[in-house]
Image (cartoon, grey):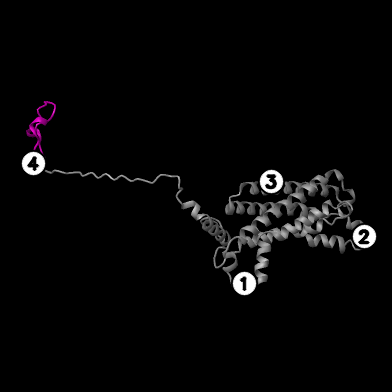
């Protein structure tokens, strides 16, 4: 779809200023599809952050921002597609553009910050793969933590709020939008394929987590193990009482001697009344 847009503007519409103002497929492959792909990717990152850190407030903020950018992206895409050209831009729909760009920037920035903190705070991240080059580690850190998507999302926000380049004066906001959807996909795939030596893409079938998740969780458990298993000092010492009981089985009742005082009562059976089959 991006190539089709390029041909529409620069090949079939070569030399035509009017063609450059037409959206063609740009609203589908930039705001609409980008916001949908972003919702999927941000949703998975949101679950992953909560799984690793159990932080409820950042997770809720990321979820709200992801839903906000999706609503804004789909809304502005539908509105612009109905208008047809950027010359017909209606300023009253700027709120949808701001919702899309701001929601993406907030969600991606939070995801990148938290994921970077979680990965860097995990000690095995630095030593588990000694053969990796610095460039490999840098690429993995930037892509897997969604840092690249956050930077492009901020670029979308800047092209929206800076008046000289904001629509309808220019259509610069479409340029980072084209890249943003691909970065979301790459970050999502990198997150799934970051396992080492596993046949299922690095995912643990029992928990749905990958190897980076397990390393971060292992680090968190090591950090908090003493607080989990240390007995509080204010509790009293535990006292255990043991009581033993012995059960006797007599096969021959005739061998049992019962004192006379115990069967003087007529309600009790006499030894002579007992019959053994």
N-terminal-most mark, 1 or 2:
2
Q: Position of residue 48 (x, y in %)?
A: 60, 54
N-terminal-most mark, 3 or 1:
3
Q: Nearer the viewer, residue 20 or 145?
A: 145
Q: Is residue 88 magenta?
A: no
Measure the C-alpha gap from mark 1 to mark 4: 84 Å
Q: Give the structural element (helix, strand or loop) at label 2.
A: loop
Question: Which residue is denoted by mark 4 in the rendering?
Answer: 255
Q: Nearer the viewer, residue 35 or 21?
A: 35
Q: Judge the density around disc 1: few (<14), some (14-19), many (≥20) Cα neighbours within 10 Å.
A: few
Q: Give the structural element (helix, strand or loop) at label 4.
A: helix
* Vertical position of residue 224 compared to residue 202: above or below: above
Question: Which residue is denoted by mark 1 in the rendering?
Answer: 132
Measure the C-alpha gap from mark 1 to mark 2: 50 Å
Q: Position of residue 207 (x, y in %)?
A: 53, 55
* Vertical position of residue 129 compared to residue 65: above or below: below
Question: Which residue is denoted by mark 2 in the rendering?
Answer: 16
Q: Position of residue 223 (x, y in %)?
A: 53, 57
Question: Which residue is denoted by mark 3 in the rendering?
Answer: 64
N-terminal-most mark, 4 or 2:
2
N-terminal-most mark, 2 or 3:
2
Q: How many marks?
A: 4
Which portion, as a residue range, is magenta? 257-276
- Predominant SS of the magenta segment: loop
N-terminal-most mark, 1 or 4:
1
Q: Give the structural element (helix, strand or loop) at label 1.
A: loop
Measure the C-alpha gap from mark 3 to mark 1: 37 Å
Q: Give the structural element (helix, strand or loop) at label 3.
A: helix
Measure the C-alpha gap from mark 4 to mark 3: 83 Å
Quadrant where the image shows the N terminus = bottom right
């Amino acid at each position: 779809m991006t190539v089709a847009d390029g041909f529409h503007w620069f090949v079939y519409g070569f030399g035509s200023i009017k063609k450059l103002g037409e959206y063609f497929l740009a609203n589908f492959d930039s705001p609409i599809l980008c916001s949908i792909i972003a919702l999927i990717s941000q949703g998975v990152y949101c679950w992953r952050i909560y799984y690793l850190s159990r932080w409820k407030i950042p997770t809720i903020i990321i979820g709200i921002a992801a839903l906000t950018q999706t609503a804004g992206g789909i809304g502005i895409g539908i509105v612009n597609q109905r208008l047809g050209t950027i010359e017909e831009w209606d300023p009253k729909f700027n709120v949808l553009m701001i919702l899309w760009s701001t929601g993406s920037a907030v969600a991606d920035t939070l995801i990148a910050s938290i994921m970077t903190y979680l990965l860097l705070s995990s000690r095995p991240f630095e030593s588990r793969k000694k053969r990796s080059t610095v460039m490999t580690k840098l690429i993995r850190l930037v892509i897997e933590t969604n840092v690249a998507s956050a930077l492009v999302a901020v670029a979308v926000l800047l092209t929206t709020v800076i008046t000289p380049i904001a629509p309808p004066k220019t259509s610069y906001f479409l340029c980072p939008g084209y890249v943003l959807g691909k970065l979301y996909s790459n970050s999502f795939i990198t997150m799934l394929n970051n396992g080492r030596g596993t046949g299922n893409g690095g995912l643990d079938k029992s928990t749905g987590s990958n190897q980076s998740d397990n390393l971060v969780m292992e680090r968190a458990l090591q950090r908090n193990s003493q607080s989990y298993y240390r007995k509080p000092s204010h509790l009293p010492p535990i006292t255990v009482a043991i009581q033993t009981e012995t059960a006797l089985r007599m096969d021959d009742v005739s061998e049992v001697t019962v004192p006379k005082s115990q069967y003087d009562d007529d309600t009790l059976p006499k030894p002579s009344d007992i019959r053994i089959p």
